Amino acid sequence: MSGVNGGHQDVDIDLGGLFRAIWRRRGRVLAATVVFAGLAFTGTSLMSPNYQSEARLLIESRQPEFSGANNQGPPQTTDSPFDESGISSQVQVLRSVDLIKQVAREMKLHELPEFDPTADPSAISDILVMLGIRKNPLDLPPEERVLKEFQEKLQVYQVEKSRVIAIQFTSKDPRLAAAIPNAMAKVFLSLQSGAKLDSNTEASRWLEPEIANLREKVRDAEATVADYRASSDLLLTGETGGTFATKQLNDISTELARVRGERANAEARAENVRAALASGRAVDTLNDVVASPMIQRLKETESNVQGQIADLSTTLLDGHPRLKALKSQLQGIRAQIVSETKKILGSLENEANVGRLRERQLVAQLNTLKATSAKAGEDEVGLRALEREATAQRQLLETYLARYREATSRSGENAAPADARVISQAVEPTERHFPKILPITIVAALASFLVSCVVIMLSELFSGRALRPVGQEVELDFEAERPEAAPMSETASQPATAPDEMEAAGADDFSVESVAAHLCDDDIRVAISISPAGDAGSTNAVMLARLVAEEGRKIVLIDLTGTACPTRLMAQSADLAGITNLLVGEVPFTETIHADRLSDAHIIPQGDADPVLAVRGIERLQIIIDALSNAYDTVLVECGAAGVGAIRKVTRSKDTKIIISAPAAANAEIVDLITGFDVEGFGEIVLMTGTGYPQSGKPGRRAA
C-alpha cells in the first residue's frame, strides 16, 4: 500500500512498525481480552438457558388405492411430485396465524409466564414505555401477545433439496420445546385432512344439482335426435348404423351388378351357340346344349340307331330297306338335335333380353334413390350435430357421476389422509441451545483481542507513524546502525561503526545524528529545542528534523524563533502563513503546514501575523501541539534562545523532551540552563552540540 506525503513521495505501510506498536501495548491488549472474556463468561452464566427441539414432516401424496367400496377404478399413484412452490406453501401454512392460535389454545400457552411479556416487566422496559420509545405491551390483547412471543421462538424451514419441512421451537422449558413442534405437526396434519374432507363434501354438494340438470339435458338431446331422425326418414337399419335410404341404395347397386353379370353371361352363351350352328360344328360340346335333357335323349337315340346301322351293315347291303329306314331315322334324329339346339339358343336370347330389361329397371330405381340419398345426406349433417351434442352431454354426465361417486366415497372418516407424515418426532433436549458459555467466551476473547489490535493499527496508520517512504531501507536492528543519544541524566553509549568511532568509545556523543537516533528509538512524540547560541542552534534543529525524516518518521518543526531561521532554511518562501497566523486565527490549520525543500519533513513557519496578537493567543499553542502529535510521529518545537519561563508557556507537561542545541555555547551557560529546567521540574534533558562531548567522569544531569 502506498500513498503520497507532504513531500510528494510515495509511502508504504510499515508492517514491522504496526506489530511493534501492538507489542508495546500488549498489556492493554491482554487486559482488554481478559476483561471482555470475563464479562462474556459472567453474562452467559447468569443468562437463563434456552432449549431447542425439532420435528420433521415429509410432504408426499397419501391418496389410498381405493377411496371407497364402490370405487373399482385403477389404483391412484401415491408418489405424485411436489414442486418447490408447493413445499414453500406448506411452510407458510405451518407459520400461519390460525394454526399457531389453535396450538396455543390447545396447550394453554397464555397461562405460561414465558409467553406473556407483561408477567414480569423489567424496570428498563417500563422506562422505555414511559418515554414513548417502546409500545406498551398491555395495549395488545393477551392472544396477540402470546402470538408475538410464539412467532419469535418458532422457526419453520424447508430442508435443502428435499420435501422435508423442519419445525424448530426454542423455549426455556425443555419439555415445552419438544411438545410444541409435535403439537404443530399434529394440528397441521389434522388441518390438511380436514381441508381434503371439506373439499370432497363441497364437491359432492355442487355435483348433485349439476348431475340432475345434466340428466334433463341428455334426455332432451336424445329426444331431439330421435324426432329429427323420424321426420327426416333417417331410420336406422341393421347393426351398421346406416339409414334406410342408404341401405336401399346399396342393395340396388348390388342387384344391378348381379343382373348385368347374368345378362352378359346369357349373351355370351347365346353367341357361342349361334356361332356353332352357323359354322356346322358339333353342338354336343356346348355346355348349354349338353345340359338339355331333350338333347341328351336324342343323343342317346342317335347312338342306338348308329349302333344298329353298324350291326346290319355287316350282313346287309346299303340298299337294303332296313338299312335305309335306319339311316332315314338317323337323319331325323339329327334334325331334331339341331332344332332343339335352336330352341336352346332362343332360350338364351330370351334370358339376355330379360337381363337387359331388368338392368334398365334397376338403373332407373338407382337414379331415383341417388336423389333421395343426396337429400338424406343433407339431413344427416344436422343429425350428426344433434348426436354430437347429445353425446357430449352424456359424456359430461358420466364424468360428473364418476366424480360424484368418488367424492362421496372419500367423505367418510379417514378416507382423505393428509399429504404429509411425521418422519421425526421432537424429543426433549438435554443440552442448552443458548447461550453456549465456552464458545461465546472464546469468541468474545478473540473479538476483543482483534478489535484492540485493529484499533492500535488504525491509530498508527491515521497518525502516519506506520508509513515509510517507498524505496527507503528499513533496518531490522536500528540500534546497530544509529548511535544512542546521550541524555544529560544518563551515560550514553555509542556503537562503533567505524574505526574512528571505535577509538572514541569512551566518550559521550552529542551529535545531531545521535539525538536523531534517540528520538527515533525512544519514539519521542514532542520535543522542544532551545538554541542559546541563536541561529547556529536553530540550524542544528533543522538538521535534526531532516535526519529524523530520513529515518522514515513523520516529523513537523514549529518555528517559534524570533529570527525565523528555520523558516528561511526549510520553507519555499518567507511569506507563507505560519504559527503566528494560526495563533491569531487568520488561517485554517491545513494552510500553515508546508513541506521542507530538501527532505520529507514538514514545517510550520513563523508566519506574517502581528507577533503581539500572536502572543495573546499563546494558550492555544499546547492545543496545536497536541493535535499535531496525533498526526505526526514527532513534533519538534524550535524556540530559539528562549528561557525556562518562556518554555513553561509552550508546554504544560514536565515529561516533554528538552533539547539544548548549543553548538558554540559555553559550558557554564549550558549548566545554568540545565539547572533552571531541573528547578522547574522538567525531566530528561538532551544536549546537542553537533559534535562529541567529553565525559566529566560524573554521571547524571550535574555532569554537564
Image (tube, grey):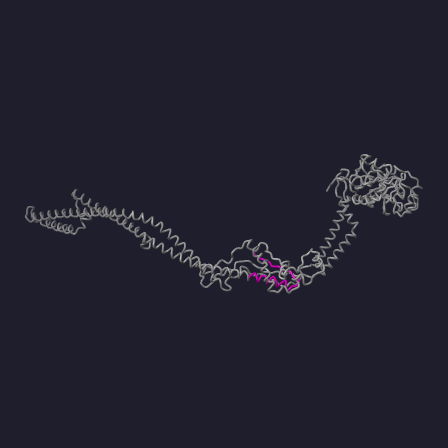
The quadrant holding residue 518 is top right
Q: Would you say residue 492 is visible in this rendering?
A: no
Total numbered badges shown on the rendered structure = 0
At 32% from the left edge and 49% from the top edge, which residue is drawn? 376
Q: Position of residue 630 (x, y in %)?
A: 79, 45
Question: Between 222 and 530, which is closer to the camera in this rendering?
Answer: 222
Q: Which residues are magenta?
A: 163-189
Is 493 situated above or below 44? above
Left or right, 483 with reference to 345: right
Question: Between 485 and 72, which is closer to the camera in this rendering?
Answer: 72
Q: Position of residue 646 (x, y in %)?
A: 88, 43
Question: Is residue 261 a member of the stretch shown in magenta?
Answer: no
Figure quadrant of the N terminus: top right
Q: Would you say residue 26 is visible in this rendering?
A: yes
Left or right, 683 with reference to 208: right
- For this orientation, the residue located farthest to the right is 668
Is 612 situated above or below 429? above
The quadrant holding residue 115 is bottom right
Is 145 situated above or below 284? below
